[in-house]
Image (cartoon, helix red, strand yellow):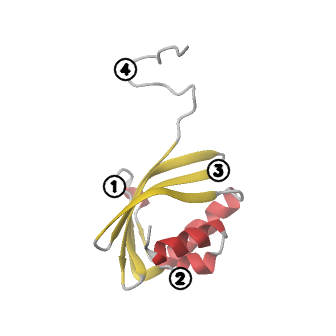
Amino acid sequence: MSNAVVERLIGALNGHDLDAIAACFGEDFVSHWPAHPSRDFQGPEQVRRNWEMIFKMSPEITVAMTNSVEVGDEVWGEWHYTKAAGQDLRGVIIIAVRDGLIRESRFYMEPIDGADAAVPGGPRLARD
C-alpha cells in the first residue's frame, strides 16, 4: 500500500495515539456502516471518542491491513483487528482520501467465528 494517510492511521491506531488518529481525518469525514446504518457517524472528534472507548475496552488491540487495492482516491483494504474486546474482527474497510485526509469510510467488519460456530444450512462436516 502506498497511501501515506492510511499508513499513518495504522501506526497511530497501533500506537494508541488519539491525537494522531484524529489528525488523519478531515472535518467533513463521514463513516458509513452499510450493514448497520445506525452506527453511521461524522467528524474526527467522534472518531477520537470511538477509539478512546475501544482502547479502554481493548487495551491490547492491534490493527493490520492484510491486503489492499487503491483505485482513484479510494483504498479498499482487508483489515484484521486482534484482541478487540476479547475477539478478533476481519473485514473490508473502504476509505476515501482527498487532500491528504480521510474523508469517508465504509465498514464491513465482523467478528471471526469460533471453531464451534453454527453453519448456515446444517452442521459442519467432520474433518480428519
Find disc 2 in the rendering and name its residue. 23
Measure the C-alpha gap from mark 3 to mark 4. Answer: 29 Å
Q: Are marks 4 and 2 in contact (CB under 8 Å)?
A: no
Residue type pointed to by label 2:
Ala
Measure the C-alpha gap from mark 2 to mark 3. Answer: 25 Å
Measure the C-alpha gap from mark 2 to mark 1. Answer: 25 Å
Find disc 1 in the rendering and name its residue. 34
Looking at the image, tell me whether mark 4 or mark 1 is earlier in sequence order: 1
Which residue is at a point 51% across and 72% down the rendered structure image? 7
Residue type pointed to by label 3:
Ala
Which residue is at a point 43% across and 59% down the rendered structure image? 39
Measure the C-alpha gap from mark 4 to mark 1. Answer: 25 Å
Tell me, for residue 108, which label it has, or none.
none
Looking at the image, tell me whether mark 3 or mark 1 is earlier in sequence order: 1
Looking at the image, tell me whether mark 2 or mark 3 is earlier in sequence order: 2
Identify which residue, 123 or 57, lies in the foreground.
Answer: 123
Residue type pointed to by label 1:
Pro
Q: Position of residue 10 (x, y in %)?
A: 55, 68
Which residue is at a point 38% across and 57% down the rendered structure image? 33
Find disc 4 in the rendering and name its residue. 121
Q: Position of residue 127 (x, y in %)?
A: 53, 16
Q: In the picture, which quadrant includes the C terminus?
A: top right
In the rendered structure, the answer to whether residue 18 lies left or right of residue 95 reads: right
In the rendered structure, the answer to whether residue 65 lies left or right of residue 16 reads: left
Tell me, for residue 85, which label it has, or none.
3
